[in-house]
Amino acid sequence: MAPQHLKKPLLKSTVESNNKVTEIVQGVIRDIRANGDKAVRTFSDKFDKWSPASFKLSGSQVQDCIAQVPPQTIKDIKTAQENVRKLAEVQRASIKDVEVEIQPGVFLGHKNNPINRVRSDDEKVDFIAGPGNAFVASPQRLLFGEIGIDLFAGLTEADHGPDTPSVLITTPEKVGLETIKIVDKLLENLPTSELAGTSWRNYGEVILVDNVDEAYKLADEFSSEHVQILTEGPREALKKISNYGALFLGEKTCVSYGDKCIGTNHILPTRKTGNYTGVLWVSKFLKTQTYQEIVDERASGEMGRLYGQVLWEVFKGREL
C-alpha cells in the first residue's frame, strides 16, 4: 500500500525567501556598514528597546546578575555546559591532521586550523554562527561569501512560526488518528497556539505506512530537522536514515532535551538542507587546509613531466 495521508497539509511548504525581510535586512546592513556601532545601537533600541551605556557587561554587573539566579539553576546550567563540553572535546579529538608520503620524497597532508576571528569587539569577524528566524537567515545569506556562516538554519518547529511543517509517520492507524485529536486538544490551551495552530492546520501531516522500513524511507525524503524515533528498536534508525538534522532515539529521549541541556548542538539543518549538510559542530570553526612538499629532486622532475600533460588541455602559460 502506498503511503496514505490521515491529515494532509492545506498548503505546500516552500523555501522561498521573503522579499520584505530581505529588503529590511539589506537596509540594516547598509546602515551598519556606514555607521558602525552607532547603527547597531540604533537598531538595538528600535528592535529590542535596549540601549545601555555599554553593551559589554562589567565584572560587577555579571556578578550582580549571577546573584539573582537561584543556586540550583546555576548548578543546572553548569551541568548543561559540561554536557556540551564533553561532547565537543570528543569531537575535536576525532578531527586529525594527516600526512602521507604518496611516493618517495613526495609528501601530502592537511592541517585543521582554527578560523581567526569568530568574536571581536572592534574588528570584522570571519565567521558567524547562530540560530534564529528569517531576520537571522536573511543576513547570513546576504553576507555568505564575504564571511563564512554555520549553515542556513530556519524554523521547523510548529510553535516557532506560522509556516513550519510537523509530520507524523506511523504504522498503526489508531496512533495517527489519536495524535490528530490530541494535537487539536493541546492547541486549545497552548500559549503559542496562534503560531502552532496555523502551522499545524496549513502544513501539518499525518501519514500511514505499511511498515517501519517504509517509514524510514519516507522520513529520509522529508529530511526533517528533528526526527524522533518511537519504535521497538530505535537504534536501527542510525543505519536506515541519513537525511536529518538530529535523531532522538526512543521515547525517553525528548526532542526538547536537545534544545538546551543534553549536550548536542541545536543549530540544525532545516528545509531539507539535511540532504547535504549536518549540525553545527566543532569542525565548523576549523579550516581543513592542504599542503604539499617534494624533497627529492628526481621526484620533482617526474612531477614536472606529469604536469607537462597540461599541454593537452591547452592551458597556455601554465607550463612556464
Image (cartoon, rainbow, N blue to C red):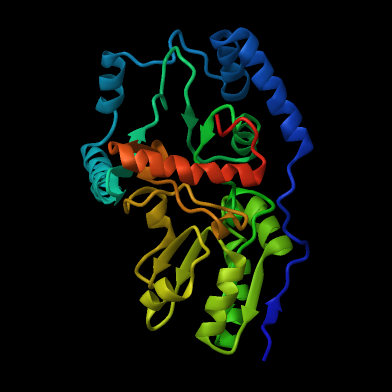
Q: Please state, as top left, top right, bottom left or bottom right, where the C terminus lies in the image.
A: top right
Q: Position of residue 60 (x, y in %)?
A: 26, 14
Residue in view at x 43 percent, y 80 percent: 231
Q: Is residue 132 above or below residue 139?
A: below
Q: Quadrant of residue 24?
A: top right
Q: Is residue 139 above or below residue 1?
A: above
Query: Horizontal placement of 69 versus 313: left or right?
Result: left
Residue in view at x 65 percent, y 45 percent: 313
Query: Horizontal placement of 187 versus 78: left or right?
Result: right
Q: Please state, as top left, top right, bottom left or bottom right, where the N terminus lies in the image.
A: bottom right
Q: Position of residue 109 (x, y in %)?
A: 33, 43
Residue in view at x 61 percent, y 61 percent: 187
How many numbered circles are shown? Answer: 0
Query: Horizontal placement of 254 versus 87: left or right?
Result: right
Q: Is residue 186 visible?
A: yes
Q: Position of residue 255 (x, y in %)?
A: 43, 60
